Amino acid sequence: MSFTIKTDNDISNRFQSINDSQKCAKRIGTISANLQTKFKDVAQYVNSLLPESRETSLCLTKLEEGLFYANASLVRNGIKEPDDH
């Protein structure tokens, strides 16, 4: 599945700033900190398991990118509501 920018609203969403609501900012901050901890745990596991190499370095870089994009999604799109099913 690909994401195509179709409207000015889609572009605005990509460049918006964080919601100023203190409640929202606190919740986002907590989730962001949890994501950071989990990504760091995976990075430390990878670093302890794999030898120094280009591939290991790329793996750690991709984890950094993953955290970056997870946080960007959190800020832009909010928090996914749990399924009631």
Image (cartoon, rainbow, N blue to C red):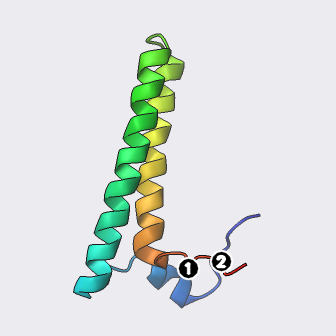
Disc 1 marks which amino acid?
Answer: Glu
Q: Compare residues 46 and 75 and report the one nearer the observer.
A: 46
Q: Position of residue 19 (x, y in %)?
A: 31, 84
Image quadrant where residue 23 sits: bottom left
| Label 1 packing within 10 angstroms: few (<14), some (14-19), many (20+) | few
- Split into 4 quadrants, where in the image is the C terminus? bottom right
Which residue position is annotated with label 1? 81
- Image position of 49 with respect to 42: above or below: above
Q: Please, what is the three-letter code of the amino acid marked with disc 2?
A: Asp
Q: Quick one: which residue is furthest to the right in this view?
A: 1
Q: Is residue 7 above or below residue 69?
A: below
- Comparing 77 with 49, the one in front is 49
Residue under the image location 77 percent in, 64 percent down: 1
Residue drawn 36% across the image and 50% down it: 36
Asked whether the residues under the numbered discs 2 and 1 touch, taking CB atoms below 8 Å apart as contact, a structural biologist would say yes
Q: Residue 20: tell me if it is visible.
A: no
- The residue that mark 2 highlights is 83
User: Distance from label 2 to label 1 (Cα)?
Assistant: 6 Å
Mark 2 secondary-structure assignment? loop
Residue drawn where x is 45% and y is 46% of the image: 65
Horizontal placement of 77 versus 4: left or right?
Answer: left
